[in-house]
Image: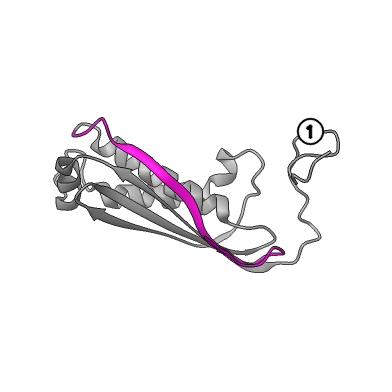
Amino acid sequence: MTNLTHLDDTGAAHMVDVSGKPVTAREAVATGRIDMSPEAARAIRGGTALKGDVLAVARVAGIMAAKRTSELIPLCHPLPLTRVAVDLTVDDTGVTATATAATEGKTGVEMEALTAVSVTLLTIYDMAKAIDKTMTIGGVCLLAKTGGKSGDWKA
């Protein structure tokens, strides 16, 4: 019926069987951004937001989210992640998050990297919304992935 791997011949959703695939080193990098007022960016950069260290909490939230991706995205396989890193760059009008996820497994870690970025940005919103409720999150995308049957890819 389709070339989508998460649908069977009848169109029903199912988790892909990866049992016959080889274990390979895999890595994915994703990014996204939250735009905000200069006041909010200053508070985040200076560590003066009322809820505390926004960047530290957001970084930990992103790492935790990557580890729980299979609980959030219905057809994702649970993966033994070997690395998750969340890098944050603050400028005058927002924060850019970049997440890297890695594993040695039978399926990729793109969803883990994307989930890490998304939850990182949502956490920043939560922690700074008292300063700026008009913040916007966008640009969440995959930058690169390595390993697996489909090989390496870069945006």
Q: Image check: 68 left or right of 138?
A: right
Disc 1 residue crowd, few under 14, some 14–19, many 20+, Cα 10 Å: few
Looking at the image, which is closer to me, 145 or 56?
A: 145
**Image quadrant assignment for residue 12:** top right
Does dot 1 land on a helix, a strand or a loop? Answer: loop
Q: Is residue 37 above or below residue 144?
A: above
Residue stretch in magenta:
131-155
Q: Is residue 139 magenta?
A: yes
Q: Image check: 135 left or right of 75?
A: left
Q: Is residue 34 above or below residue 29?
A: above
Q: Is residue 48 above or below residue 91?
A: above
The residue under the point 45% across, 47% down is 140
In the displayed image of the protein, which residue is found farthest to the front?
A: 155
Q: Which residue is mark 1?
A: 12
The residue under the point 85% across, 33% down is 10
**Image quadrant assignment for residue 121:** top left
Q: Image check: 40 left or right of 12?
A: left
Q: Residue 95, image x and y in percent?
A: 29, 50
One can see residue 64 in this view:
no
Q: Residue 77, image x and y in percent?
A: 66, 49
